[in-house]
Image (cartoon, grey):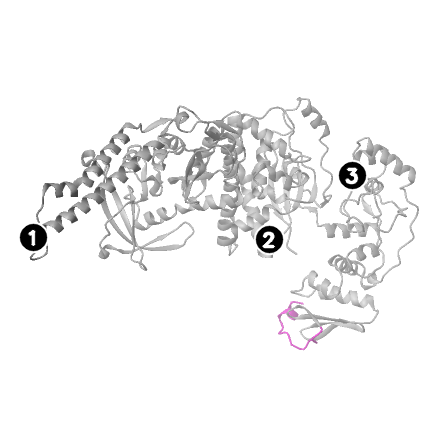
Amino acid sequence: MSVLGEQTALPVAPPSAVQISPSVAVLDGPDGGMVLVNGFAAYCWDRGDDVFRRLAAVGASRLPDVTDVAVAAAFSTSTVSLWRWRRSAEADGPAALIRRRPGPRGPSKLTPALRTEVDTLRTRGASIAVIAERLGVSTFTVRAALGRPPVGVVAGGTGAGAADPAGGDADADADGDTGTPGEAQIEGGAADLTDDDVVNDRGDEPDGGDTQAEVQEIEVAAVGSVDAVGGEALLPVLPDPVDRSPERVAARWGLLPYAPPVFAPAARVPLAGLFLAVPALAATGLLEGARQVYGGVPYGFYGLDVVLCEAVFRALLGEPRAEGATRVNPTDLGRVLGLDRAPEVKTVRRKMGLLAARGKAEELLTVQARRHAAEHEQAMSVLYVDGHVRTYHGTRRIQKTHAPRLRFPAPATVETWIADAQGAPVWVVMAEPGASLASEIRRLLPEIRGIVGDRRVLVGFDRGGWSPALFADLIAAGFDVLTWRKGPTPDVNAGSFSTHTHIDEHGVKRTFQLADSTVAIPLDEHAPDAGQVTLRQVSKLDPGTGRQVHILTTRTDLTAGQVCFSMAARWREENYFRYGRMHFALDSHDCYAVTDDDPDRSVPNPAKKKAHRAVQAARARLARAETRRDEQLLALRSPAPGISTVITNQTLNQITAPVHAARAELDAAVAAHRAIPTRLPLGQVRPGQQVLDTETKLLTHAIRMAAFNTQTALARTIITSTGYRKAGNEAHALVRSALAGTGDIAPAPGRLHIRLDPLHTPRSTAALAELCTALNVAAAVFPGTDLQMHYSVKPHR
């Protein structure tokens, strides 16, 4: 066989032949057909000779480099029929391919009296499994009585069914059913479908009948839901969720702390890919920190772990806001959470409101940040600090601030974010109203030291944090400085530049034109005696434009290339802001509650600014008046030749009068400016000003940071632990696709096995399989249980 695949293919196949591999082609017409291997006929059949046609299909499927999908398409059949033909030929020879006439059907068990009893029990609230057990029939019969298609059978027609999820009768109903043609005839876990039913549902020609056991094997192959952990056990396709009605009743009366996750065996579960997020989510510290800070939520059906996991999973699906729960199937998400259904919007808001009312969101963020610092020591050697403006477009009276993206002042709140060297968000706090980035960094230094411990940390920020006094404070607190130099700066001699290289964490070589020097920056430009701070300056030259930019740092042990790359990597934090706005609703207002701002808070007096503009205008008028005076005096003192001019006191007074008037206006403006207080209580300047709720926003930030870091950790694992060639560009897209994928849930004692369905391409499926292997090493436990997670991927077909 292998020799045929190695021979050179001859281009002699007819144009109408279907090429199913480089060496194999199929010619199928109204008068018969043949299978050509390297241009030679290997199998032939005449018109109406179905036995030899099937034998040719079986023989073609055994050739090298030929897939079942290609053979089934060439012979106008399905892969299930091809599999059945091959299995029958292997077991009983070519004679097994002869079509047999299906046997007669007997009367149905589904009598009118039985239908009436099923309807009566169902109206009383009994489940399908309870009805089947009470009446002594299978759940398939109950579903047929209720007008539902059996599990695994397409509604309105026949199809490949699955075993009875409730563990019904083991024997097939020999009597069958005489219902309508669109009603599937399944009883007791085995399908009473003729071969015609199976094939016609696949669009194939009718064939002879098989035994009921053989049909059930066909269903297993069609559904593809065989548990690889607990032996070859058939999993039911999307069974009803585990009945949690008693627990819901107990929760309604306040008798249940929370409903623990319970997983039932199920195949083809939507959103099963979300289980991939469990190990990385545990590493973020969100769940552990929430238990430490909040302890739990009031008694009810949904516990703290479920509330947070549901929010993170929903964010990973692209629905981070509470309203997104209406766009995610609650039953599908509930299966992933181990419940009968996920919480609804009102429940999500109520639970989040209960947590926000405790006022511990900042404490939760701090615990998460410390966990991140312990898990990522290398990445925490560099911290980037930046402010983020979240604009507000409602009707509340919110303080205005400059919005860089809008380029004009707008109602907004300002947040101070801290990210690690990889750009992963670590910590966030609400900035003080009107505070600069420099003052925010100075205010947060004790908290940052509490997060990072005694390690040496390089703090990077942009020109918004420029302050020589801040540099001195950072150095005194044991931190290193990394920032751009601000203001007019003399260029470095062009001969001082040389080529420097740096290899980043992904192995990419970076090349820069840099010059290294030392500069002394005065602490106060208006007070030369205030002292100065000495910093290292790394200047970068743009070869194309000749423009120079200068980087200041206190790290003398780093190479110039490392300093330049670290400063440029600050944009990773900006990239998170952009990605967060696109995928995690970073700027959304998750709570529209407001509180009154502190009326006694000192704020700048707007009248002071107006008076300052009046002083500047008066000073400009004085300058113009002096200019006109000098021009007139020059003209009087330099008359034309032959002309005499007499300058009198009256003339001088007339010329200098506008100057005296302008000077008087300037003195009055200066006096008025000095008389106006610089700051006033907020209640006098802007009475009735309000502040947006911060607790709910910080709590949602903690959840979305965990979701982002979870997704990033999975993408980084794909980059470092798989052979996916395009991981550098497609890792995040592959993760999003995998998280939304389907799969099987196969619980076992102490273990929860997730067998994911293949992705859209073989290389993506291979990368997903390698990711699963890496995640199995983590041995993560599903939250709220003692079930250790184990992952695998079905082979790509």
Name which quarter of the figure residue 326 lies in.
top right
Mark pair 2, 1: CA separation:
102 Å
Badge number at residue 644? 1
Between 785 and 547, the residue placed more toward the observer is 547
Left/right of residue 38 with respect to residue 554 in the rendered view? right
* Label 3 sits on residue: 167
Give the number of the disc on residue 765: 2
Q: Amino acid at mark 3?
A: Gly
Instruction: Label 2: state its secondary structure.
Output: helix
**Residue drawn at point x = 6 percent, y = 57 percent:** 642
Q: Earlier in the sequence, mark 3 or mark 1?
A: 3
Q: Residue at x 42, y 29 (%)?
A: 686
468 relative to 736, above or below: above
Image quarter where the N terminus lies is: bottom right
Amino acid at dot 2 = Thr
Q: Is residue 15 magenta?
A: yes
The boundaries of the magenta stretch are 1-16
The spot of residue 598 in percent (x, y) is 43, 25
Q: Earlier in the sequence, mark 2 or mark 1?
A: 1
Question: In the rendered structure, which disc, 2 or 3, sits on the residue that comes first in sequence?
Answer: 3
Which structural element holds mark 3? loop
Label 3 vs label 1, nearer the camera: 1
Which secondary structure, mark 1? loop
Q: Quadrant of residue 384?
A: top left
* Residue 706 can be seen, yes or no: yes
Which residue occupies 69% across, 28% down? 248
Image location of residue 425, percent across then percent down:
45, 40
Amino acid type, residue under disc 1 in the picture? Ser
In three-dimensional space, the C-alpha distance between marks 2 and 3, rounded to whole angstroms, equals 33 Å
